[in-house]
Image (cartoon, rainbow, N blue to C red):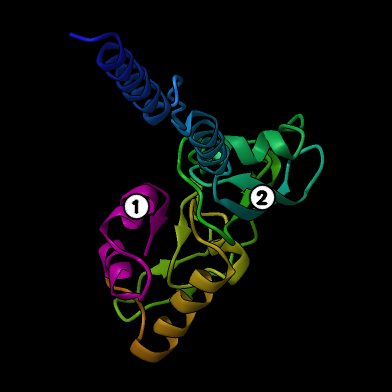
Amino acid sequence: MTAGLFCVLLVAAVAVGVAIAGGTGGVTIERSGTAETAAADEGAAKREEVKAQIVVHVDGAVAAPGVFTLVEGARVNDAVLAAGGMTEGADTSTINLAAPLEDGAKVHVPTTEELGSAPSTATSDSSGTSSSTAASNGLVNINTATSADLQTLSGVGEATAQAIIDDRDANGPFSSPEDLMRVSGIGEKKFAKIKGHICV
């Protein structure tokens, strides 16, 4: 092999090596998107932390009656605590502190004096027996109760109380507590929460 041919082959080999190195760029840069993914995950987590809210009205034997905003799934006890807790003389025998709340619900905490001296609004039903809005045992008579009386029941707000009164006026008195389920908006679950606090 002549010296000239050797030089030509050497130059060609060097050129191929340079071309290969140039094709790879020497360094490979990859964009994994890790920062963008982390930011998106953080945003999603923050959105999950923002829970739906409900607005409830709390009055009666509480320190600070008023309208309060609570997280969805709150219980009656949460509403009472939001209103500053119960005052001396509060009577919880007719309310269920563990009952879940609905948006627009009203929580009324009665006093022992209020339950013990509830005014009698005795009426005579078709059977000739006497009934009253608040029986001696503290039960709410759904045939004679006012809107305010009905709203003392767990989960019964102003709208539901009015629906009960409207149904009663249109279809006559309820024959049994279970008849309350004929009112629109009162299903088996809601009835189960209040059946121990009502009578006819």
Residue placed at 52% from the left, 47% from the top? 72
Q: Quadrant of the N terminus?
A: top left
Looking at the image, do the residues carrying marks 2 and 1 touch, with CB atoms under 8 Å apart? no
Q: Give residue 54's position: percent from left, percent from top.
A: 59, 54
Question: Is 196 contained in the magenta span?
Answer: yes
Q: Which segment is the magenta one?
A: 176-200
Question: Is 41 contained in the magenta span?
Answer: no
Is 169 placed left or right of 103 in the picture? Answer: left
Q: Main secondary structure of the magenta part?
A: helix
Disc 1: which residue: 195
Q: Give residue 47's position: percent from left, percent from top.
A: 55, 44
**Nearer to me, 194 or 126:** 194
Is 30 placed left or right of 67 in the picture? Answer: left
Dot 2 alpha-carbon crowd within 10 angstroms: few under 14, some 14 to 19, many 20 or more: few
Q: Find the residue positioned furthest to the right.
A: 64
Q: Find the residue positioned furthest to the bottom.
A: 170
Disc 2: which residue: 117
**Nearer to me, 174 or 64:** 64
Looking at the rendered structure, the kind of residue marked 1 is Lys
Between tags 2 and 1, which lies in front?
1
Looking at the rendered structure, the kind of residue marked 2 is Ser
Which of the two discs, 2 and 1, labels the residue nearer the N terminus? Answer: 2
